[in-house]
């Protein structure tokens, strides 16, 4: 994957260091990108150091497209974020290049033309030109909507998603590209070229391995370009909106070796999506997890700080992917300074713990059949039926609760809790009962708990009917 790095050498502007290795400087690149096509021929990806308020984004995208390069894969670095420190600038450029190389190609369905957003000072005086932005794409083959999952519907702040008859309907025009649906989806069915787990890993690994006097810190920021993190020793990790960042992402960055991590609120980044409350919850939960592990909670904040991590580097397979939250918690547990497992409860927790009351449960299996993430499952063997639970897969969606026919008797409940001991335990049986076999064909009729509940509802006056129901399955009840 060949990455071309270009820097704008605008007249009268000295914000971008002029001696960066591997960087081609182009005079007035931000305002006049028409000659880009010839310069980037042969490259697969492009990274551009630009002056955001001068950037003619629509023209840049057209030039990149003419060079047969994905315009949604272009990485932009603000001049202000690399100003004054050439060594830090080289580190940031290398990180963006690594991210660009690891980014996935966009598909036509990812692209949406728009006339909105920030425009350069010169563009204000001209007729608007459309530019293209990345919108999410749902992969139907891995979507759990058929099981009743509505995670994206509940997370979207603009009702761009709607669940109907076991399918998710997506309104591209209503989408504000905040990315919250991506991290809310329990199956990883929603993707966007604006952010991917592989790209985040590549960028942070590049930043961590850079040769600097001190370990670098990272700040997750909205891509609205209203803020540039220019604090010494800090680098931006751009995301569609900081409101999409789960609590485990800054912790994952710490475990990968950064010195500190921040999730910058929308209001500080000039983002108008208003996800500040979401960011505050993310930072608070991340701090709670660190504190539960005996680690300085100030290592994660909402703005660049001075705390320095000594967590070292931990091996993780997919810290920013679908199963990343569990993997990050277990990696944090591995370096915990306490004698007890990490456990954090509350509405902010991104995992749930299912509890079944065996006195009320009939083993009807409805809970397992409606679980969208597979946290609940059922199995039958040797005259028994069982429901099992894997805390690592539970998102706390509570979809199983209203589906339970015995919910009013307290048969099932869900607590939002991140519990490292349960995550480590894996799948465990939480409800089990014998099945009653058909005397005619030998197939199972129902669980003994279910038949007991039916008998209780029918009462003593229907003992004869109950006796018959308990001896024959549905298929054999008409047989002589």
Image: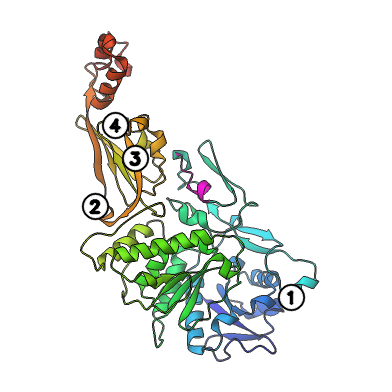
For the residues labelled 2 and 3, the Cα–Cα distance comes to 20 Å
What range of the chain is rendered magenta?
148-155
Q: Secondary structure at mark 1?
A: loop
**Image point (20%, 63%), residue name:** 339
Neighbour tally class for label 2: few under 14, some 14-19, many 20 plus, Cα within 10 Å = few
The percent coordinates of residue 128 (x first, y second) are: 76, 66
Circle number at residue 361: 4
Q: Position of residue 330 (x, y in %)?
A: 29, 61
303 relative to 53 in the view: left or right: left
The residue singled out by tag 2 in the image is 425
Front position in the image: 451 or 283 = 283
Q: Which residue is mark 3?
A: 413
Label 1 CA crowd tier, 10 Å (few <14, some 14–19, many 20+): few
When asked about the image quadrant of residue 135, the answer is bottom right
Q: Position of residue 360 (x, y in %)?
A: 28, 30
Q: Secondary structure at mark 4?
A: loop
Please determine whether, in this image, residue 166 is positioned above or below residue 180: above
According to the picture, the residue beneath numbered tag 1 turns out to be 121
């Amino acid at each position: 994957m060949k990455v071309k790095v270009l820097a704008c050498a605008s007249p009268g502007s000295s914000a971008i260091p002029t001696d960066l290795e591997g960087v081609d400087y182009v005079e007035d690149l931000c305002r006049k990108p028409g000659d880009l096509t010839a310069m980037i021929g042969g490259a697969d990806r492009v990274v551009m150091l630009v002056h955001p308020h001068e950037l003619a984004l629509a023209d840049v995208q057209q030039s990149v497209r003419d060079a047969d390069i994905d315009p949604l894969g272009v990485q932009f670095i603000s001049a202000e974020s690399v100003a004054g420190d050439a060594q830090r600038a080289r580190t940031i450029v290398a990180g963006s290049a690594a991210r660009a190389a690891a980014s996935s190609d966009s598909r036509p369905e990812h692209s949406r033309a728009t006339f909105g957003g920030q425009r350069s000072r010169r563009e204000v005086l001209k007729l608007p030109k459309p530019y293209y932005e990345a919108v999410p794409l749902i992969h139907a083959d891995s979507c759990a909507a058929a099981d009743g999952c509505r995670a994206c519907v509940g997370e979207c702040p603009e009702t761009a998603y709607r669940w109907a008859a076991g399918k998710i309907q997506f309104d591209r025009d209503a989408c504000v590209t905040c990315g919250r649906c991506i991290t809310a989806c329990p199956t990883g069915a929603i993707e966007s070229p604006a952010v991917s787990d592989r790209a985040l890993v590549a960028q942070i690994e590049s930043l961590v391995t850079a040769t600097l006097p001190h370990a670098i810190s990272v700040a997750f920021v909205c891509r609205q370009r209203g803020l540039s993190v220019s604090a010494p020793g800090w680098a931006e990790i751009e995301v569609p909106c900081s409101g999409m960042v789960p609590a485990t992402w800054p912790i994952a960055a710490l475990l990968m070796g950064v010195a500190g991590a921040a999730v910058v609120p929308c209001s500080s980044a000039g983002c108008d999506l208003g996800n500040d409350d979401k960011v505050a919850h993310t930072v608070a939960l991340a701090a709670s997890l660190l504190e539960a592990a005996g680690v300085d909670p100030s290592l994660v904040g909402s703005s660049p700080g001075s705390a320095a991590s000594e967590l070292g580097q931990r091996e993780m397979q997919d810290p920013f992917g679908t199963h990343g939250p569990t993997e990050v918690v277990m990696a944090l547990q591995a370096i915990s300074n306490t004698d007890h497992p990490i456990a954090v409860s509350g509405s902010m927790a991104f995992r749930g713990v299912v509890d079944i009351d065996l006195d009320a449960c009939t083993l009807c299996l409805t809970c397992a059949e409606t679980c969208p993430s597979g946290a609940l499952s059922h199995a039958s063997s040797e005259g028994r039926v069982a429901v099992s639970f894997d805390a690592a897969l539970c998102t706390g969606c509570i979809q199983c609760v209203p589906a339970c026919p015995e919910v009013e008797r307290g048969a099932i409940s869900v607590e939002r809790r991140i519990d490292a001991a349960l995550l480590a335990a894996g799948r465990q049986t939480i409800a089990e009962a014998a099945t009653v076999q058909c005397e005619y064909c030998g197939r199972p009729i129902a669980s003994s708990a279910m038949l007991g509940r039916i008998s209780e509802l029918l009462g003593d006056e229907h003992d004869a009917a109950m006796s018959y129901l308990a001896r024959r399955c549905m298929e054999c009840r008409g047989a002589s």
